[in-house]
Amino acid sequence: MKIKTDEIASVIRHEIEQFGSTLEISDVGQVVEVGDGIARVYGLGKVMAGELLEFESEGRTITGQVMNLESDTVGAVLFGDTTAVREGDTVRSTGRLLEVPIGMELLGRVVDSLGNPLDGGAPIHAKETGKVDIVAPGISARQPVKEPMQFGIKAVDAMVPVGRGQRELVIGDRKTGKTAICLDCIINQRQYWGTPNAVVCIYVAVGQKDSTVASVVETLKKAGAMEYTIVVNAGASQSAPMQYIAPYSGCAMGEWFMWKGKDPNYTGPKHVLCVYDDLSKQAVAYRELSLLLRRPPGREAYPGDVFYLHSRLLERATKLSNENGGGSLTALPIIETQEGDVSAYIPTNVISITDGQIYLQPELFSAGVRPAINVGISVSRVGGAAQIKAMKEVAGSLRLDLAAYRELEAFAQLGTELDAASKRQLTRGARMVELLKQGQYTPFDTIDQCLAMFAGTRGLLDDVAIEKVREFERAMLDYFRGPAKALREELVKAASFKGLEDRVTEALKAFKQTWRPA
């Protein structure tokens, strides 16, 4: 029998090729202890910190992530249905880090921390995935923050301006309107959608009730804002590991748009706004994981690296340099205080990481001053760089004027006789406070804000009854969209009152003579 060497060689070659394609080398271990979203695994000798693990249980695969590397076991957190994992189950290392789906396909959707849809819609077929935890861009990859991120809220845009690429903390007790301010900002981005200045918004809900998140989504839908928004929901009913990674997942989804500005063929949005609601609950979830993993507790039972938890998230907010496409990611972290205690551990941590804070005061909220922004404590470290010229011109001294008004108001309550100048200051201050009040989910156009501030700071409201100030404002803005439309358009074009100040004052005086309160 003659043996054909060519045939034998081709069979061997085919077998080797098949062997190479099906061979999979992986570290395999076994679950020795499981509970509360935490698993201890024995036998994973080569696994890395932060690596993804696959737990095989009753024909299902549950994802986990390495958190602790100990002498004989590995501590891991479990994502998804943590009750499915049992003692003795097989665990495989993957050699990969945690990733979530990214891209345009996520716009308008409500997803969980792993990017799975929660809105009952079609499955998300994203073409790409992005790493959940990355190193933030370095100094050389960034540029100074100089473009305004308009909130549409007079008190914020005039006194605590936020720029694209900034990290502005929203802090206050529960039920003081923290979420409402951030939703106003998301709704206000509607005017830019479809333009080169378009902003993609990402709302991350951590530890919220599902009913609360549903009402947020409904509000955004009614305002037509879901079109450019992604909602990441790690609700109170979800496990601590899912709540812990939710802000990082939302940030990773946003970074895709930010870095996409570098692609010369890409014409979509490259500016992102991330709202983390709220990081206090993320810190609590992380504390829970850390205590279950036997990490030593520190101040207020939080682990020593809880500062790093928030700093590595918020450092990813940036305004990229022009060489990198000039995209930006603005972060609005929310922190809930207990009884106004801003000196607690987590509030002080996040204050030191961010570029300023908007502090909402319960007393102001109860007194009907809404948004209840405390001007004395609220600050933006970007300041005038994040304002158009017209706003800088009218709101330059507003903070100091309001602070002086508050002091004088406290003094006047003692029943002291006041001189004429002090009375004038009280009169104007009271009207400016009234002017800064604003309804929920009704963002103002920037030029409308400038005109309102102009009327207030130039004393044109001093003789208007306090309860009629907002009525006057509405009628005045209608006047500038009607009879004085040409002057308003000039102001929009110039974005400054320079050369127009006298004409605007005359127009306001002319309107005031014809205005009759209802």
Image: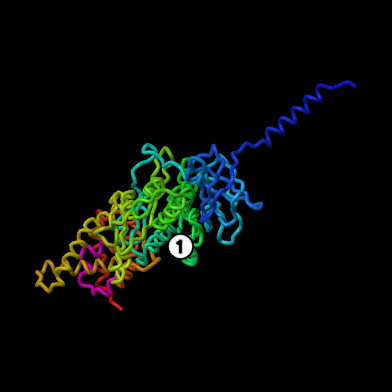
**In the displayed structure, would residue 79 be above or below residue 338?**
above
Q: Find residue 58 and report its horizontal and vertical position in percent.
A: 65, 53
| Badge 1 density bin: few <14, some 14–19, many ≥20, Cα 10 Å | some
Say which of 9 and 225 sits in front.
9
173 lies left or right of 75: left
Relative placement, left or right, of 74 versus 9 is: left
495 relative position to 262: left or right: left
Placement of 377 over or under 425, stated as above or below: above
Q: Position of residue 405 (x, y in %)?
A: 19, 65
Q: Quadrant of residue 484?
A: bottom left
Give the colour scheme of this rendering: rainbow
The image quadrant where one finds the C terminus is bottom left
Q: Which residues are magenta?
A: 453-469
Question: Does residue 306 show up?
Answer: yes
Magenta stretch encompasses residue 12: no
Instruction: In this rendered view, identify the residue nearer to me: 71 or 62.
Output: 71
Viewer-nearest residue: 226 or 41: 41
State the image coordinates of residue 239 (x, y, percent, origin top left). 50, 57
Image quarter in which the N terminus is found: top right
- Residue 160: percent from the left, percent from the top? 29, 56
Q: Is residue 147 above or below residue 448?
A: above
Q: Residue at x 26, y 65 (%)?
A: 507
**Residue identified by numbered label 1:** 208
Q: Nearer the viewer, residue 376 or 515?
A: 376
Amino acid beneath label 1: Gln
